[in-house]
Amino acid sequence: MTGPASHQIERSTLATRLGLLAGAAVLLALALAPAYLGRADLRLLGEIFLYLSLASLWNLLAGYAGLVSVGQQAFVGIGGYLLFALTIFGGVHPLIALLIIFVAGGLVSMPIAALIFRLRGAYFAIGTWVVAEVCRLGFAQLGALGGGSGISLPVKVVKSIASSRAGREAASYWLALGVAVLVIAIAWLFLRSRRGLALTAIRDNELAAASLGIDIWRTKFVVYSMVGALTTLVGALIFLQKLRISPDAAFSVNDWTAFVIFIVVIGGIGTLEGPIIGTIVFFLLRETLADLGTIYLIVLGIVATIVMLFAPKGLWGAIKHFTGFQLFPLGYRVRLAKGGKQDSASMKRDAEG
Amino acid sequence: MDWLNAIVQGTLLGGLYALFAAGLSIIFGVMRLVNIAHGDLIVLAAYLGLTITMLLGIHPLVALLVLVPVMALIGYGLQRLILNRTLGEDILPPLLVTFGLSVIIQNALLEVYTADPQKLQAGALEIASLNIGGLAIGYLPLLMFVTAVIVIAGLQFIFYRTALGRAFRAVSDNQDIAQLMGLNRRHIFAVAMALSLAVVAIAAIFLGTRTSFDPAVGGGRLIFGFEAVIIGGLGNLWGTLAGGIILGVAQAIGAQLHPGWQILAGHIVFLAILAVRPRGLFPRMDG
């Protein structure tokens, strides 16, 4: 764009840049939290970050790749069990185990993808659930890992993370925060990349995308394995925080998929910001209504169903619709130079539609 | 002999799985809807059956006379009031709404009936059996299997021999043109869901008399029904029966090998068939 351009193409607006700046400030405050927050608060925040990661990952699958999975608990459980197996039997340091688990998660997800990509739409969803059930029943048969009743992380392994209790809690908190930041950054950068653009095209119209030469199967395969690897890593962190694992807890469809789906639907599916809003709403509801037990789950289900029926773009979708604000800009805007009418001239060529 | 027995008992159990699957098959065939709450609706029907038998003091099979119309009515209302709003090009809304319904039903059952396992009492029928060449064949499993065959034959008749079936096939082929021909698709869809839940009522009574149930078992029943549908091939009702039988036999053989492998064996056979024949054994339509 040389010379006196009649227009400019920009990705971010002033509001976006201020928003990201505020986000960075919040992140800094969160990173320093172990210095000024109590144990219970740290633990809760750690859990929030892990749910935020799961929600962002599921959103990448369902909201962008059109792969609606109800079997992500397979990866959470595998991650948890690998952590226990590697540290207990392999004698691997937990932090190194996390790296191995990340790679292993990606490797495991590839054959699974090759198999269940044969199912389409909703049948794909139930197919992922079958895979998760196979994992649950399979791990329940492994006597060395506690069989059906589960196993605890030995004290020796726990102490190898940090010798003091406060040190361990801070480490576990930072790991959770780190993985949430990693997941959101990867999702954002991926969606801005060439392959991300292909993914958005597939989401909007598969046939048109294919006719432009996009390899649909391959693009979905890449997303599925990437999400699989990261979900496995999150799973390992979840059970590093819990210190105990059993097949029913590791492969729970309610804990690792139902809640995650509700978070994304309420927050706004198909937006990067949606899972963040959804996670905040989910934990606000949980902290206020948790005493009601099953009623709380019924309320959550009803809220999610109503949002899906009447506001399918969720809370963030409504915010974006009215303000046009994006915290994580993905599209482009064309802004005409002075003289052009500024108001409607900032025609949004928004890749997000 | 043990193996022959496992195969025979597995085949009869397959009848129950075919009943789970037939309800899914109907609504997928008519409106391409996959109902994630299907398993929980089976459990809901089982609990309603329990309440009816307790209140009226009648045999579970007699309770069907009340339960079938009640479930059909629930199905009609559910489709008309909620699910019709979700149908369209996008597959996400029906999936997520039925998933939400599944969680709502499961927890509402937990609230009303508690987590205690319950069972329908069928009296002498539960333990009576027929002795054929050293094999003991229970009357209840036999009745279950025969019912499945009759239900599937009945559905086949409705789909291919009646005006309602013609309407089902018309909206399935092209909703807009069917609408132009004077069919109200919202009504037809609701009737299909009513039919689906009528079959669910029958399946639920057999589920409840065969084993105990609690609010959490819905997901598993959905998966069995789904596996039977995919093994048999989409859109083929007799294929669904074959799928149910294959699943039942696989589970029975798995259980014979090792008690912990029963359910696992069924899943593995399903995944193996998916790997070799992705469209199922006898497909009639595309997913």
Image (cartoon, coloured by chain):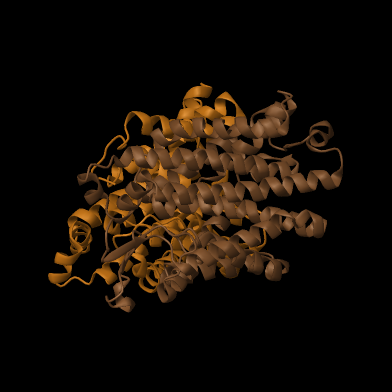
Could you tell whether B190 is left or right of A287 in the image?
Answer: left
Looking at the image, residue B138 lies above or below residue B25? above
Residue B54, horizontal then vertical, whole percent: 60, 65
Residue A82, horizontal then vertical, whole percent: 64, 32
Residue B103 visible here: no
Could you tell whether B172 is left or right of A309 in the image?
Answer: left
Residue located 66% across and 51% down the image? A177
Residue A87, horizontal then vertical, whole percent: 72, 29
Residue located 53% across and 59% down the image? A275
Q: Which color has been applied to chain B in this rendered view?
A: orange
Residue A199 visible here: yes
Q: Which residue lies furthest to the front in this view?
A: A3
User: Observer-nearest residue: B56 or B269?
Assistant: B269
Residue B260, horizontal then vertical, whole percent: 61, 31
Q: Which residue lies furthest to the top in this view?
A: B1
Residue located 43% across and 42% down the image? A223
Residue located 31% across and 31% down the image? B277
When asked about the image quadrant of residue A133, the answer is top right
When asked about the image quadrant of residue A347, the answer is bottom left
User: Observer-nearest residue: A101 or B256?
Assistant: A101
Q: Which residue lies furthest to the right in this view?
A: A164
Looking at the image, residue B251 lies above or below residue A45? above
User: Observer-nearest residue: A257 or A35?
Assistant: A35
Q: Which chain is brown?
A: A
Looking at the image, residue A3 lies above or below residue B152? below
Could you tell whether B15 is left or right of A34 in the image?
Answer: left
